[in-house]
Image: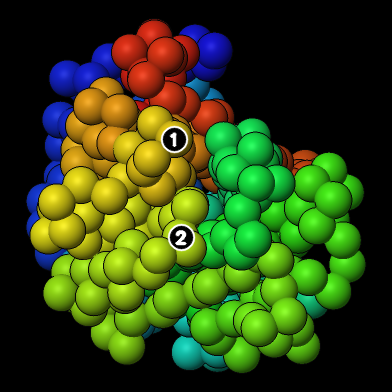
Amino acid sequence: MWSFVLGVSVLFGIIGCSNGDSASDTGNSGDGTVIEVVAKGFQHDFWKAVQSGAQQAADEHGVRMNFVGPKDETAIAEQLEMLNNSINKNPGAIALAALDTNAQLDAIQQAQSKGIPIIGFDSGVPDAPDGAVKATAATDNYKAGAIAAEHAYEAIKDRIAANDVSRIGIVSQEVNSLSISQRTGGFIDKMVELLEADSGVGQGKIAVTGHDKFRNDIQEKDAKVVIELRVPAEVTDAAGKTEAQALLEKSDIICVYGSNEYGAKSIINADDGLGGRIGITEDKVIAIGFDSGALQQDAIRNERFYGSVTQNPVKIGYEAVSLAVKAAKGEPASDVDTGVEWYNKDNIDSQEIQELLYQ
């Protein structure tokens, strides 16, 4: 486990973190290098954990780091203003987790024309101009979704073999974000692969429904397994709960997956209103999550959730700044997969997992 991971009290006590526009400008900067970090927001403690890792890297490399982010992950214009401000400071490099690359193209091209290298992190800077982004530190979200599917499959494969029809539900916050879409696609593709190979379901018997981006041509009436994706019309607790409840109320549902903290929370909230349909026993719906909010951790400890996948936000921040330092020095920088871990009731309180969890 990473030796640089900070204690909980340090992790969530970073100077400069608050709701709304937040920034920290710290570090020794022994050689005068400044790294600007533009995150997606500060509304979630995930970003505070990212910041702690970024600060650790800045301290180790002796550079000054300025870490900023908009009030939440919908504030595209606010993040663009922060990016422009960072460019105007002429830093050694910029680490960027773009909310909307298209909205930032002019700014990215300006950074490129000024010779300021950009390092992507978290979901990175997809579709950036060639050469603008030198490397990215991020979770392989497609692989992470596949890991969630592998664990889900182990929990439900016997039921699938015994049932005439089984339904697997997915609650996804959206289908436009690259990271969430990859977690959804990775889960679906791996689940289809496992069902076709190991359960004798066979090709042509798995219907993927619910959204055109992932839908296949198999009809529910012809399927032995239905994978149904539900996406709320708006990102509110009420809308997420409605979509999750629509899944949990179906008589053939055996498993449900939330592809981020919002999705997992939606499942928990819906289950609260239904009297407890999810759980880890054979008569319950198996619930699989992603990320690690307080509700989700409690659900795992109380055996309502079978388990979840967590990213390593501290490592994301650490590697982003480390790559930015390399780029600022003109050294080659390569993409870093910051990894994920599976956790459940058996290992959630281990030191290895506790270092990765955030509320």
Compared to 132, does 26 lie above or below?
above
Query: Which of the image's four quarters has the N terminus?
Result: top right
Q: Which residue is mark 2?
A: 253
Q: Secondary structure at mark 1?
A: loop
Distance of label 2 from label 1 (alpha carbons) = 12 Å
Where residue 93 appears, as percent x and y from the top left, is 56, 55
Nearer the observer, 270 or 130: 270
Picture quadrant where residue 68 is located = bottom left
Q: Secondary structure at mark 2?
A: strand
| Label 2 with label 1: CB-CB less than 8 Å | no
**Is residue 70 visible to the viewer in this orientation of the structure?**
no
Nearer the observer, 357 or 197: 197
Rendered residue at 15%/45% (across/down):
16
Rendered residue at 61%/53% (across/down):
163
Compared to 322, does 44 lie above or below?
below
* Badge 2 amino acid: Ile
Rendered residue at 14%/51% (across/down):
275
What is the basis of the colouring in this image? rainbow
Compared to 212, does 17 lie above or below?
above
Where residue 174 appears, as percent x and y from the top left, is 44, 76
* Badge 1 amino acid: Glu
Compared to 281, does 284 lie above or below?
below
Picture quadrant where residue 77 is located = bottom left
Where residue 25 appears, as percent x and y from the top left, is 27, 45
Rendered residue at 61%/64% (across/down):
165
Q: Which residue is mark 1?
A: 282
Q: Residues within 10 Å of mark 2 (few under 14, many from 20)?
A: many
> First in sequence: mark 2 or mark 1?
2
Where residue 109 appears, as percent x and y from the top left, is 62, 83
Q: Residues within 10 Å of mark 1 (few under 14, many from 20)?
A: few
